[in-house]
Image: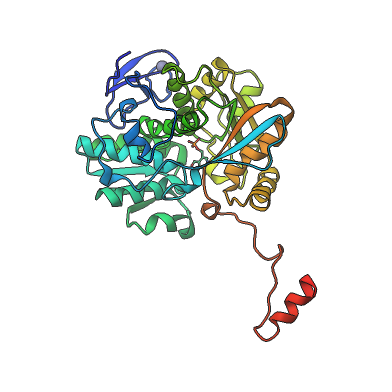
Amino acid sequence: MVFTHNLLRCWLCGSKQEFSPNNYFCPRCRQPMLFETGIQKEISGTARATASIEEFIEFLPLKNYQSWLSLGEGRTPLLPLKLSDSRVSLLAKLETNNPTLSFKDRGSAVVMQKITELGWRKVGTVSTGNMASSTAAYAARAGLKAVLLVKKGTSPAALLSSAVFRPLIIEVDGDYGQLFWKSLEVGKKLEIYFANSVDPLRIEGYKLTAFEICQELRRAPDFVFVPVSSGGHFVGLFKGFYEMKQAGFTDRLPVMVGVQAEGCSPLAKAFEAGEKSFSRIKEARTIAHSIANPDPPAGNLVLHLTGEYKGWLTSVSDEEMIEAQQELAEAEGLFVQPESASTLAAFHKLRSRLSGTVVLIMTGQGLKAAHQPSPTGLNYFRSNLEEMDKVLKSIIGK
Ligand SMILES: Cc1ncc(COP(=O)(O)O)c(C=O)c1O
Ligand SMILES: [Zn+2]
């Protein structure tokens, strides 16, 4: 198979079209199309010190690698967890260790490589969270103008990690789902590359996580748990494992387990009902804002992949996520967003059906989440300097 740098294919109906910025939805299926990739090179079984993009450039729609655009993304740790037992070897892929503390950096990095190659000067995104700060940081590095379109009422605190990079921020009053589509239209007119959640270049970045996992384990794991909102990350990881199998590097695909929040689980609901397409949710009710898309733009593609390749979709409650977040902190020393901890909550729920190697993708660092448990009410006390020793003694004794 030959890799063509600019061909997109719909994985639902097989339609193909040339890649052009802001124009990647299949006109028939309304799902994002993905870059066609062929395998030109064997990958080695040992992780190298180079950036993932550079090492895997022949699997990516890029002509060459421009190292100055990188912020050091990728090559994240695959950490064995103590929660493993004789049946399950449990590992966490720490995407929290990326430059702006989430997996989004892998996508932003590929976006910047490609759009600077194409000569674009402006990049945008529709997000208030991890994708916004990641896009703004990489734009600053590349010297591009960043445009963030955010929901009316977004708190300054939520924007803090983006605003520091001085992007242009526009707060938009109106339906947030429609803003996604409108951004692509306006991007075409004003020559702004809108690197939204399911952009095919972002998806190419996410697939490198799967490459790294296969490289480290020397095969695909048995199960991979990942939180799902728009579906972009799930699709990217799946594509990565699929290409590793095509390359003959692994003889099987993992069971991909997509995890949603109970208060916003259009895909898990459709999956449980055996449907091929989902119905949008009226209103998301969850503290897990990063996985609260009521109308996921890659939703039907995720359902197609889980149906065709025997994946699973499930949901967990806010309480279960928070409990799992705390468990990861106390038992493993990891501080992740509740959204990321949803994977551990789902792991507990499905544990009796699991065996072999299980990887949980830790998508975002805990400090990035809007709703943190207050330190007061945990093991938290106050004291003045003079009495500190007495206070400590009264708490821990002698
Ligand atoms: C921490 C975190 N986890 C998971 C997701 C969901 O990813 P996707 O929208 O690609 O499904 C997001 C998206 O913003 C996120 O920020
Ligand atoms: Zn199609």
Q: Is residue 16 above or below residue 134?
A: above
- Residue sitting at x 45%, y 21%: 249
Q: Is residue 129 above or below residue 191?
A: below
Towards the viewer: 27 or 203: 203
Indicate the position of residue 264 as horizontal and vertical percent values: 60, 37
Towards the viewer: 63 or 197: 63
Indicate the position of residue 168 as horizontal and vertical percent values: 32, 53
Q: Quadrant of the N terminus?
A: top left
Looking at the rendered structure, the number of numbered marks drawn on it comes to: 0
- Residue sitting at x 47%, y 48%: 97
- Residue sitting at x 59%, y 22%: 311
Colour convention of the picture = rainbow
Quadrant of residue 226 in the image?
top right
Q: Is residue 227 visible?
A: yes
Task: Name the outermost residue toward the bottom.
Answer: 386
Q: Is residue 184 visible?
A: no
User: On the rendered structure, is 353 left or right of 138?
Assistant: right
Towards the viewer: 319 or 356: 356
Q: Is residue 187 above or below residue 352?
A: below
Quadrant of residue 377 in the image?
bottom right
Indicate the position of residue 171 as horizontal and vertical percent values: 40, 51
Q: Quadrant of the C terminus?
A: bottom right
Task: Name the outermost residue toward the left.
Answer: 119
User: On the rendered structure, is 19 left or right of 32?
Assistant: left
User: On the rendered structure, is 259 left or right of 113?
Assistant: right
Indicate the position of residue 396 as horizontal and vertical percent values: 77, 70
